[in-house]
Image (cartoon, rainbow, N blue to C red):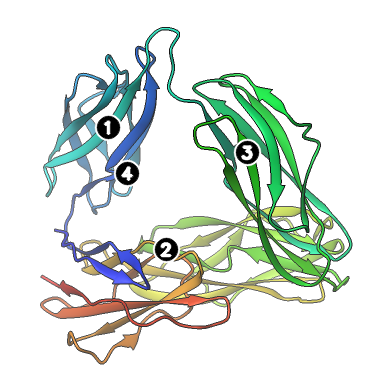
Amino acid sequence: MRYFFPAVVAGSLLSLVSVYASAQRLECSPCSYDFGDATIGAPISYSIQLTNTGSAALTILSVSQKGSAFSSGSFPLPMTLPSWVSVELPIVFKPTATGYTDGTFTLTSNTDNPTLSISTSGTGTGTGGSSAPAKLKVSPASLDFGSVKVGSSASLKATLTAANAAVTVSSRQMTNSEFAIVGLDLPVTIAKGKSVPVTIQFTPTGSGAVSGEAEFTSTAENSPVDQELQGKGVTDSKAQLSVSPASLSFGNVNVGSSASLKAKLTASNAAVTISSDRSTSSEFAIVGLDLPLTVPAGKSIPVTIQFTPSGSGTDPAKVGFISSAADSPTVEPVTGTGIVQNSPSVYLSWDGVSTAVGYNVYRGTSKTGPFEEINTALDSSTDYTDSTVAAGKTYYYVTTAVNGQGERSGYSNVSEAVIP
């Protein structure tokens, strides 16, 4: 059974609080999708992820739909999903007329929520040789250059794509002189559906974080198009080893099972040799890293962290990497919650705040407080699972956002969770 409680944190929406106490649960991600503009008669597709979040296997029995412009792709039924296993439901949008249209897919299953609805929408544009208004897209929408030594330059690639019709790019502009567009001769006309490469260069003139925008003016309907840019100038020439993301949260994992997450180790300024690794808890392990290993300057290597809970409850720990870097050891906080199947827990998620580097979660037994911080380390994700709840109790939750200067926002509004 799952209960939903809306709340607002630091100007954004704390969209979901749920209490797990079910053996079978079918969930969708996302549960609604807008295909945007599509030419009449030209099908486009998108896949919805379906996940069994319960502790026992479930069976999807049927899929039905409303809306003649939408259909499901190959999806054999009945389909059995084991606990915490996902499958993709392909959805096809093929408009037959101009204008907006919507539809609904309904799935039935032998679960506590036997009917699951997924809403779809899209807009038919043009027929035959006609098309929707021209649009220019830049991808990725943002570029992060990371740390670059002052006086040096780093380059990243982007792409400009003409959607629906040909687009002529006439000019470009940077909001910060430490960023530059190189190798793009203007004006340039991009044919419908085609792309041209763009190289953005970052040359920091001083130490510290830098941000800016690249702006492209064109004949497209959505002109000008902006791309966000950020980087950091560094003056230290000593070798550095960094790990990203800054922390890893494994969420709920059944006792006796394992879950894995990826991280990335990056060498800055000079090559770094990693000689050994370690973990402060036996429940966390670094796997697949053959040491010793040298990472060239400016390069990265992937690393896999595995969480295997031996009992119920939350285990905060740290994994570290011993290296030749000046900032050795490189440490990453990790946390995970071991759960026994069918034990209750409260799951919270919220929309992120662009200026936040992390969030804190607080719990109380009264709507007016006091509230006690329950996360052991700043949570860089936008969700949190509280597995230390007791049956028959009522809890109240608030969250705060923390920016890069360590400043904390005020409490969000209060969310209530009643444990069955």
Q: Left or right: 110 with respect to 321?
A: left
> Which of the marked residues, 1 or 3, is nearer the chain's N terminus?
1
In the structure shown, which secondary structural element does the residue marked by tag 3 occupy? strand
Mark 4 and mark 3 lie on one chain; the one further toward the N terminus is 4
Q: Which residue is mark 2?
A: 352
Disc 4/disc 3 C-alpha distance (Å)? 33 Å
What's under tag 1, amino acid-wise? Answer: Ser
Position above or below: 117 against 174: above
Q: Is residue 272 above or below residue 404?
A: above
Where does label 1 land, which residue?
A: 121
Q: CA distance from mark 2 to mark 3?
A: 30 Å
Could you tell me the amino acid type at mark 3?
Thr
Q: Quadrant of residue 323?
A: bottom right
Which residue appears farthest toward the top when viewing the image? 128
Q: Helix, strand or loop at disc 4? A: loop
Residue position for label 4: 30
Judging by the rendered image, the residue that carries numbered circle 3 is 217
- The structure residue drawn at horizontal position 72% and vertical position 37%, both measured from the top left corner, is 198
Q: Gap in Å between the C-alphas at discs 2 and 4?
A: 17 Å
